[in-house]
Image: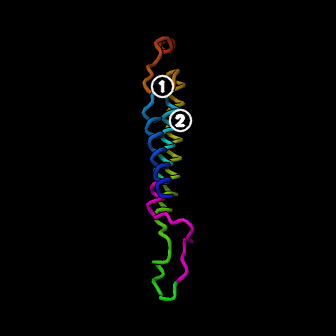
Amino acid sequence: MLWLFAGSIGLLMGAGAYLVLRAHGFSVVLGLMLLTYATNLFVFASGGLQVGQAPVKAPTQSGGNAIELMADPLPQALVLTAIVIGFAMTALVLVLVLRALSDLGSERVDAQPDQSRSGEEER
């Protein structure tokens, strides 16, 4: 189970890095989203993956500290915060790509302004 989870994180990270390095703006947006998902899964997995166990364990007869019986809430809180930040970053990059599309006439990252359009604006 752990190898499957790690492999899926690696696949998401690799596909996201490939898409971010492409020259098209919408590919960059998709790559950013995949990198965000991979990072969220990685942070969530850092809290410890335990399949088939409850988040709060029942106290044993030998006693035990109540803190040791609970799941770690910090990775869950970090993932929730990262989801909001990732959504805001995706919206910002999408707006930048749409602005480049309207101003330059192309959504490529390395696009140059059209000379015919800039000549019309100067008149």
Tell me where residue 9 appears, x and y as whole percent.
47, 49
Point 44% across, 41% down: residue? 14
Using the image, tell me which numbered label, if any, was put on residue 121: none
Image vertical order of residue 94 relative to residue 40, above or below: above
Q: Nearer the viewer, residue 25 or 53?
A: 53
Q: Which residue is mark 1?
A: 108
Q: Which residue is mark 2?
A: 95
Hey, what amino acid is under mark 1?
Answer: Arg
In what element is the residue under mark 1? loop
Q: Nearer the viewer, residue 69 or 61?
A: 61
How is this picture coloured?
rainbow
Q: Earlier in the sequence, mark 2 or mark 1?
A: 2
Q: Which residues lie in the magenta part?
A: 41-59
Image vertical order of residue 107 relative to residue 71, above or below: above
- Whether residue 50 is in magenta: the answer is yes
C-beta proximity under 8 Å, tags 2 and 1: no
Point 50% across, 62% down: residue? 76
- Report crowding for label 2: few under 14, some 14 to 19, many 20 or more residues within 10 A (C-alpha): few
Magenta stretch secondary structure, dominant? loop
Tell me where residue 113 appears, x and y as whole percent.
45, 19
Q: Nearer the viewer, mark 2 or mark 1?
A: 1
Spatial CA span between label 2 and label 1: 14 Å
Hey, what amino acid is under mark 2?
Answer: Val
Point 45% across, 54% down: residue? 42
Q: Nearer the viewer, residue 60 or 93?
A: 60
- Whether residue 37 is in magenta: the answer is no
Tell me where residue 32 appears, x and y as whole percent.
48, 41
Point 51% across, 26% down: residue? 107
Image vertical order of residue 75 relative to residue 71, above or below: above
- Report crowding for label 1: few under 14, some 14 to 19, many 20 or more residues within 10 A (C-alpha): some
In what element is the residue under mark 2? helix
